[in-house]
Image (tube, grey):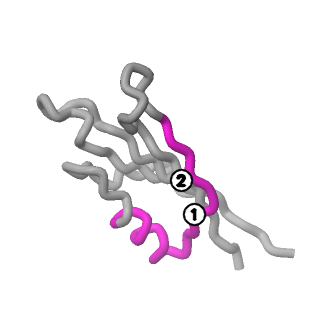
């Protein structure tokens, strides 16, 4: 039987940096060791954070997206469900 550890990577618009506030993104990793802030990007670039998780053995198996209610085409948050095999 395979045992797994589970985590999630939240990638959310920061909403704090000037007029382009929805263009800045915070990455937060929620894993077995607690919450880790992985920094803020000036644009949506989650690939760097997904690669960081992959280097630690995590694999994404689901992705959920949240859009702003006032603007249906503006992305507000993305959450990746992740898992890795436990030896």
What residue lies at 45% left-to-right and 77% top-to-bottom? 55
Is residue 68 magenta-colored?
A: no
Q: Is residue 20 above or below residue 43?
A: above
Kindly state the secondary structure of the residue where label 1 is placed.
strand
Task: Find the magenta span and give its range.
Answer: 48-66
For residue 80, which numbered disc appears in the image? 2
Q: Do callouts 1 and 2 mark residues in contact (Cβ within 8 Å)?
A: yes
The residue closer to the viewer here, 73 or 45, is 73
Q: Earlier in the sequence, mark 1 or mark 2?
A: 1
Position of residue 6 in the picture relative to residue 34 (left or right): right
What residue lies at 77% left-to-right and 70% top-to-bottom? 3
Q: Is residue 85 above or below residue 12?
A: below
Indicate the quadrant containing the N terminus: top left, top right, bottom left or bottom right.
bottom right
Is residue 57 magenta-colored?
A: yes
Q: Which residue is mark 1?
A: 60
Could you tell me how far apart the alpha carbons at marks 1 and 2 are, in whole angstroms?
6 Å
What residue lies at 41% left-to-right and 52% top-to-bottom? 36
State which quadrant residue 59 falls in: bottom right
Q: Position of residue 62 (x, y in %)?
A: 62, 55
Kindly state the secondary structure of the residue where label 2 is placed.
strand
In the picture as drawn, the residue positioned furthest to the left comes out as 18
In the picture as drawn, the residue positioned furthest to the front comes out as 73
Position of residue 83 in the picture relative to residue 22 (left or right): right
Indicate the quadrant containing the C terminus: top left, top right, bottom left or bottom right.
bottom right
What residue lies at 53% left-to-right and 53% top-to-bottom? 80
Q: Position of residue 79 (x, y in %)?
A: 51, 47
């Amino acid at each position: 039987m395979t045992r797994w550890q589970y985590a999630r990577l939240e990638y959310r618009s920061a909403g704090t940096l000037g007029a382009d506030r929805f263009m800045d993104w915070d990455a937060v990793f929620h894993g077995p060791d607690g919450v880790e802030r992985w920094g803020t990007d000036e644009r949506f670039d989650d690939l760097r954070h997904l690669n960081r998780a992959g280097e630690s053995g995590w694999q994404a198996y689901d992705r959920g997206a949240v859009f702003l209610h006032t603007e249906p085409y503006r992305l507000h948050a993305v959450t990746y469900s992740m898992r890795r095999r436990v030896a």
